[in-house]
Amino acid sequence: MATLDAGVWHRLGRNATPALAKRKPARPRLGPGRPIPFGAALGPTLLIAAWVLGSASGALDPETLPAPWTVAQTAGDLIADGRLQSNLLTSVQRAGSGLVIGVLVGLVLALVAGLSRIGEALVDGPIQIKRAIPTLALIPLFIVWFGIGEEMKLLVITTSVAIPVYLNTHAYLRSVDARYVELAQTVGLSRWGFIRRIALPGSLPGFFIGLRLAVTIAWLALVVVEQVNATSGIGYLMTQARTYGQIDVIVVGLVIYGLLGLFGDLAVRAVERKALSWRQTLGD
């Protein structure tokens, strides 16, 4: 018979046996715990519920923030006459084009700066300068250089998106363990082999962090550029509504921007989980 701890003997009595000893309660799991089913919808659902309750109780002035059912009716009217679909398609095309180009530019610059000291000396300084300059401050200069057409809007979104992708990918590239570099040299990996097998996998977590930020920033930049002499897009729709005092149309535009940002982030996180399935993190 195994010897029991003296304290256990004292609590259980002299005739106690190990079979009667109570097991110690399991320690609570450290960290955030198990994922909640549909947890991403919980916060937005509570926000909408508060909006509904505030409107129904009269706590929210409809002249300041229209009720959800009023906004839903307005959205239905905009869909019925086709204005919402056409302007939404224009906005998605602008944001999508700027996002794709910006992500590619940010990734290439991060690889150049992260894998070469000369590249870092040439690239990192200008990127840090752009990082310190707000996008709004650049718009007047871009208008002078490129006019007020689509080229200016695309350039604003692209430059805004490239910064977070560059910063996070570059940071993770530089944090790759030096032992992996030594191992690559030992086994005789080529430059491309080192990039494909070590550098890129090591920088993927940072790339996805930057991509999540880039998706949100693309919509933020879109809001700004679509209110600069635009003739289509959700921002244009909101600008027209502001002119005529249509607060419900403005709220429809804000809801659409919010939903696009939310679903874009969820899509990136889903791809991230698949691409980084080999990692074990607190989020798993």
Image (spheres, rainbow, N blue to C red):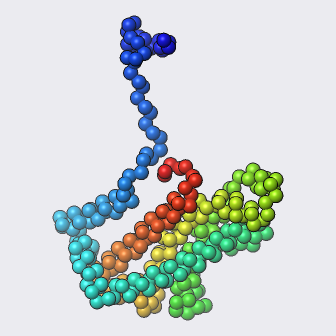
Furthest-front residue in this view:
1
Q: Residue at x 47, y 44 (%)?
A: 31
Name the spot of residue 48 as percent of width and height, x first.
29, 65
From this viewpoint, which residue is outermost toward the left? 57
Q: Residue furthest top?
A: 14
Q: Is residue 252 above or below residue 56?
A: below
Residue 120 visible in image: no
Query: Is 11 on the left or on the right of 188, as rendered?
Result: left
Tally the marks. Answer: 0
Image coords of residue 96 (percent x, y): 50, 79
Quarter holding residue 98:
bottom right
Specify whether 252 is left or right of 99: left
Q: Nearer the viewer, residue 159 or 134?
A: 159
Q: Is residue 111 left or right of residue 265?
A: right
> Which residue is at a point 74% across and 63% down the rendered structure image?
193
Q: Position of residue 196 (x, y in %)?
A: 70, 64
Which residue is rendered at x = 71% and y = 72% of the image? 123
Residue at image coords 58%, 68%: 164
- Is residue 194 at all visible to an observer of this figure? yes
Q: Position of residue 144 (x, y in %)?
A: 58, 91
Residue 205 located left or right of residue 229: right
- Residue 141 lies, with reference to residue 36, above or below; the image says below
* Of 271 and 10, the residue lying toward us: 271
